[in-house]
Amino acid sequence: MFGVVLCAVREFYRVSAAALTSVAIGVQMKALVLAGGAGTRLRPITYTSAKQLVPLANKPILFYGIETLVEAGVCEIGIVVGDTWREVEAAVGDGSRWGISVTFLRQEAPLGLAHCVLIAQDFLGSEPFVMYLGDNFLVGGVQDFVRSFQQDQPNAQILLSKVSNPCQFGVVELDSQGMVRRLVEKPTVPLSNLALVGVYFFDACVHEAVRAIEPSDRGELEITDAIQWLVDKGKSVRASTVTGPWIDTGKKDDLLEANRIVLDMIESRVDGFVDVSSKIVGRVVVESGAQVRDSVVRGPAIVGKGALVANSYIGPYSAVGPDCRVEDAELEHSILLKGSAVQGVRRIEDSLIGRGAMVGRSVDQPRAMRFLLGDHSEAHVCGS
């Protein structure tokens, strides 16, 4: 019945064809999206902004995850929020832009991923669900994994990716049949090079698991401990390996890499103003209200709404956010967040510049570098 109703209103909600196909074959599942956490590895950006709302190609990371879930047929999403709940709730809204319903669940402190499941039990009920970390960037979607989980019906299914630095992740050891044997969070001596991707599928057994485990040494209820509890109790816990790119966008360089991947997939579009003295090369998006004057923009790149690029060079893999100003400057492989400005600077690359920030050249004598940097900031200058 629900599938019939959804089809009837699909034009209003503009649900993707992939999502409609999934619903038609009965793939319906709630999702729990985690959008809390302090984002300490992205400070000072995350002192004033949720890490899940840092943009890739001018769209919040969180939105890519929501779209991935919608394409897999998810119609109800619970979003766990923390100290930045106001910002996340304002950005996401009620979910109608994706044709879904959204429920916000507030976590009073970052007490672990398993704690998120604990506080979400009323929302989740006894139905199977998918848990998705909101700062994850996963190319290729999860539709096939949703389908296999529903067909095979294990108690839990986890996604894995081979990594070169397993000590920084939750790591999994598999048995000869590919079933999960052991999980360890950030091990000193890794069990394998298979890291947990932040996407998990569970049936109702997980609720007993998260109630049974104890906080870890860092005071959190670890999802790895909950999954290990399921393994130890003889529950079926299977693993699938993702083949496409997966990035944990917790650091600046990871964000830039994810931004590069997204920009590689854009189609050229010029909705703003580009004067005759400017040159657009390759795949470039100039959003409405943006202006490009006396400049070169070499794609893949995006210039956001209301931004100004004047007498400047914007190089590949750059995302200039809404209302930014780039004047008499060069920029490449960088992200400028909303309202930031770069003026009179010969070249900036591999950089993440926060909202409302200003990078400029001093003309006062004596000539010197002058900074106003917040806690945990970084500044790299080249010698003369």
Image (tube, rainbow, N blue to C red):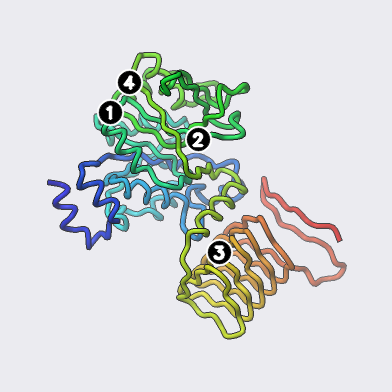
Query: Nearer the viewer's eye, disc 4 or disc 1?
Result: 1
Kind of residue at disc 1? Gln
- Which is nearer the N-term, disc 4 or disc 3? 4
- Which is nearer the N-term, disc 1 or disc 2? 1
- Which is nearer the N-term, disc 3 or disc 1? 1
Q: Which residue is mark 1?
A: 153
- Which is nearer the N-term, disc 4 or disc 1? 1
Q: Is residue 281 above or below residue 210?
A: below
Kind of residue at disc 4? Glu
The number of numbered badges drawn on the structure is 4
Residue drawn at the location 37% of the way across and 42% of the way down? 142
Q: Residues within 10 Å of mark 3 (few under 14, many from 20)?
A: many
Residue drawn at the location 57% of the way across and 68% of the way down? 324
Q: From mark 2 to mark 4, how far is it between C-alphas?
A: 27 Å
Kind of residue at disc 2? Ser
- Element marked by disc 4: helix
Please state if 147 lies on the left or on the right of 284 as rendered. Answer: left
Quadrant in which the C terminus appears: bottom right
- Which is nearer the N-term, disc 2 or disc 4? 2
Q: Which residue is mark 2?
A: 161
